[in-house]
Image (cartoon, helix red, strand yellow):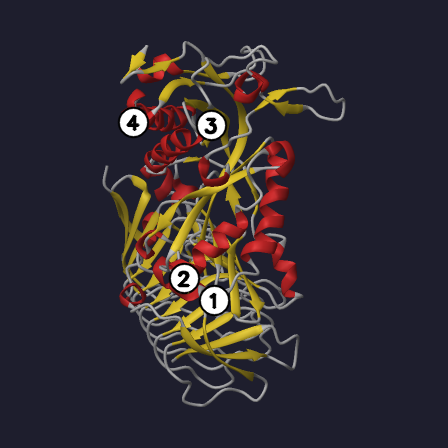
Amino acid sequence: MIINGVTIDETFAEAFPMKGTRLIITALNAKWAMISAQAFTGFATSVIACGCEAGIERELDPSETPDGRPGVSILIFAMGGKSLAKQVETRSGQCVLTSPTSALFSGLDNDKKEIALGQNLRYFGDGFQISKMIDGKRYWRIPVMDGEFLTQEKTGVHDSVGGGNFLVLAESQAQALEACEAAIEEMKKIPNVIMPFPGGVVRSGSKVGSKFKALNASTNDAFCPTLKGQTKSDLSPEVESVMEIVIDGLTKEDIDKAMRVGIQAVCDLGAENGIRRISAGNYGGKLGPFHFHLQEIMA
Amino acid sequence: MSALTFTLKRSPAQRIDCSLLTPNALADKSVSDIAAIELVMGNSTVRVDQAFDISGDDASDITIKNSSSRLDFIGHNMTSGKITVAGDVGAYFGQFMEGGELDVTGNSGIYTACEMKGGQIKVNGNTGDFVGGARPGYKNGMTGGTVIITGNSGDRTGDHMRRGYILIEGDAGDYCGTRMVSGTIAVLGSVGAHLGYAMKRGTLLLTQQPSQGISANFNDCGSHTLAFLPLMLASFKKLDSKFAELETFSRVQRYAGDLGGIGMGEILVKL
């Protein structure tokens, strides 16, 4: 398959089941809601070492938030419910509770499976915390130095998908980056997904395993352009740079949509802008149950 | 199917216990079965069809017409459905109620919503004392649900209240929120003396300054913008009440007490 001179490899991205939730952070103004959200989603690029993958989904108008203030919706994913709960609790405690004027709400209802949100943060109130049941949901009012921190007690957990991806193979670093930026711009418009790496783009895609026993992941040498003559390379001579976009989403369909608009944005730049191929990372289909076939997505 | 309607034949000489006339108690019963139910009246009993004319057959939607303040325990232990009462009701209206809806066009007696657990009660008039309270000797009053009073409430509203909402569109009597453990009482009108006496936790939300002032057992914590208030007021929008029309606000004067006890309760007065 070739779109605008860009070859779409006959391959697939392999993704894994994760547990995810959506949180809504509000503040006195959009600036401080964003600051808090950025702190919460910091160091959350990959479960390999961060324990979770998190990102900002979008900014929210006051009419869309529970308390009528400007807000930001974020998505956070982890490999299991317990690890998700731990990450949500520590990040909420250190990055939202501490952030001036903030409030924290669940953005995902699931009565059957919930994890703590403010349930344990309430103890920071040292006995002065106050519970309020509003519309069947419990909230905690925790006294803090700038007033009160309001947080919902629990948030719903959704069976999610993590690790959807595609690789952009270009003739230069600058062209690969420009294409990825264009893709991210379009993918941000798709709800229920995040691209957790810095700016949505990862330049250090990994393969499973390493020659060093201590590591369970290492550089994806087949796609490293400087190793073309040293390893079994997957790159043609004219490809000088490869960048990857990783996508986590609440459902497989959400990731499908995000990949489609992202790849399309890259292909719109086309061969004339140095984009040669679109490929994807997988492990032979043996590890992850979700397969995103590039040519099917772009058909 | 039409609403199961009980029309009181005449004002009873003695009080009648109507606790058996709820949607859950009458579900799957035929009209003849219902007619034969014996209700406690004073120190004797009376058949339902002796006290009431019965029409309709939908037990999930009960109407009591020509009601009297001598009809006690209406909506007792109710778990679902609706009871609409035309007229006044007696004591223990909605006692132990867990779900469903109660609506009375007139006044209700003492212990309305006594130890209520869920659902909604609307009194389109005044209520007696101890709304949402606990029975004498019991520690927990209302533990859930919403009570809307369009008129005035009696004394000791929310005595031992533990959760839920009591929304008073008119005035509240003396000792409002006394011995309250948690929950929220909101009053649009005035409040009587000894507001929040022996209150442990919970919130008394007032839209006007109490005419008799705040008790010395409550300390002024200053004026604040509280983020939970818009959220709570927004939850009132779905109610058939003046509280639904209340313009949202978050700025209040906060008083904490009763400091004669643990002092974790609060009186919030709109600024």
Res. B184 mark: 1
Instruction: Residue at 37%, 77% (x, y): give it.
Output: B207
Given this view, does label 4 or label 1 mark the residue nearer the observer? 4
Q: Which residue is mark 2?
A: B232
As measured in the structure, the alpha-carbon distance from the residue carrying label 2 to the one carrying label 4 is 50 Å
As measured in the structure, the alpha-carbon distance from the residue carrying label 2 to the one carrying label 1 is 10 Å
* Chain hosting mark 1: B
Res. A243 mark: 3
Amino acid type, mark 4: Leu
Mark 3 or mark 4: whose residue is earlier in sequence: 3
Tell me the element at label 2: helix
For the C terminus of chain B, the quadrant is bottom left
| Furthest-right residue in this view | A213
**Do the dots labelled 3 and 4 sit on one chain?**
yes
Tell me the element at label 4: helix
Res. A269 mark: 4
* Chain hosting mark 2: B
Confirm or deny contact between disc 2 and disc 1 (CB under 8 A). yes
Amino acid type, mark 3: Met
Q: Quadrant of residue A86?
A: top right
